[in-house]
Image: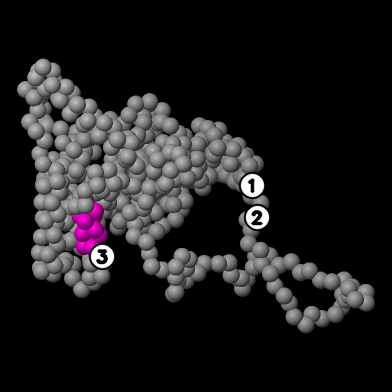
Amino acid sequence: MWAIILEQREMIAGLTARIQELEDQLAKNSGNSGKPPSSDGLKKKPAPKSLRAKGKRKTGGQPGHKGHTLEMVHEPDHIEIHRLANCPHCDHNLDEVRALAIDRRQVFDVPPVHMAVTEHQAPVVCCPNCQQHVQAPFPATVKHPVQYGGRIKAQAVYLNSYQLLPIARICDLFEDVYRHRPSDAFVVSATQALHNQLTPALTAIREQIIQADVVHADESGLRVEGKLNWLHVLSTEHLTHYAVHPKRGQIAMRDIGLLANCQGRAIHDALASYFQFDNCPHALCNAHHLRELRFVTEQYHQPWASDMAQLLLDIKTEIAQTTETMTLLPDRLADYEARFDTLLQVGFDANPPPTAPSPRKRGRKKQSPPKNLLDRLHKYKAETLAFMYDFRVPFDNNLAERDLRMIKVKQKVSGTFRTRLGAEMFCDIRSYISTVRKQSLNVLQALSDALLAQPFIPA
């Protein structure tokens, strides 16, 4: 009987843990975990609450904001004069009557466009002195009897790699706008031609990311040839580098070769592989911590979690209001550290270590999500509060997540990359485009320059 009771008790404990695990999975959403918003679905339930604090200002333009609206130009491209031939009251002829004033209205529109064809001719002449037939060379960009020009190629790459239009829809757009439909192969060849010119720009991006003071790192799944691969991003406020690799962890990061040589602080989401690189200091994303703390508050009803989230937000607020120094004063640092340690202790008291597993089970003891979070905050206290010690360190890793977002949109549009070469080319071109955008430059012009072997090189 005692054996049966002990066996049932062990079974009940296992089922209780399993039920809690399943309930945790159901309770997770984009507001309290790392799940993307697309996973929330369309069910009729309250939307996840945003972690952003509600602003005190009214919506719309703020005082002092420079508005953007259409304004009349002094020299329009075309002028159309609309005169009355006869007076609407007495039908008197007004052709010779001088105008007292002119009321003006301007319409901004795009003129009808069509594909312009430029023919290059090189006359062949016979030299009267040596009797040899000679002709002038064609421009370096004119290599074939019939070909597309650089501007239309840049537009094709712009639409495919930046606006993420599928190749067939790009051809549809050209047919509707220019009344000329190129082949699908034209878009592919234009992409390849551009990619061949990006080596100097990509080399400069890699070198400058390695030397940056702060680098944001993240990774996300990407399907290539029908298989799960991983997209790795390293970025700064002015630079972006994408790379695709079959692996997610340390092997991929070393093969890419950037993180192992970085000199500045790496901001990431606490994936264990990042901590294998001790050549650079680390900092953790507190947006992830806020979501996990909200999950512990909602699912486990532990007050220490909401207090810890409020503490992190209080530190962030004080930093935003401190402009004279690049770190908080020593007494403020000591106060926040003490509050942090106190809340950790309260959390550990509420989440004691799990009991030792039975001899039949091997491996690490399974812990609850609150205990795992507490262990991380305790072990990586300095990395969690790095933004408090050095204002150059951001509070979160949102920059890398924003850089990943459009690549995920590309996957939603296309489903998968059919070839690895295509995925690698897309990552290189997006690295170039994202860097150009961060430098506040015109993307279409930068693509045109690259096709002329003059890519933008970040300074």
Say what amino acid the circle numbered 3 marks.
Answer: Thr
User: Which residue in the structure is indicated by mark 1?
Assistant: 114
Image quadrant in which the C terminus is located:
bottom left
Q: Tell me: 411 left or right of 391.
A: right
Say what amino acid the circle numbered 2 marks.
Answer: Pro
Q: State which quadrant residue 295 falls in.
A: top left
**Mark 2 vs mark 3, CA separation in Å:** 51 Å
Element carrying mark 3: helix
Could you tell me residue 219's position as x and y percent? 28, 40
Tell me, yes or no, if residue 397 can be seen here: no
Q: Is residue 196 above or below residue 59?
A: above
Q: Tell me: 439 left or right of 119.
A: left
User: Which residue in the structure is indicated by mark 2?
Assistant: 111
Identify the disc placed on residue 317.
3
Q: Is residue 306 magenta?
A: yes
Q: What main secondary structure does the magenta stretch of the protein show?
A: helix
Viewer-nearest of discs 1 and 2? 2
Give, as a single range, the part of the protein colored magenta.
Answer: 305-317
Image quadrant in which the N terminus is located:
top left
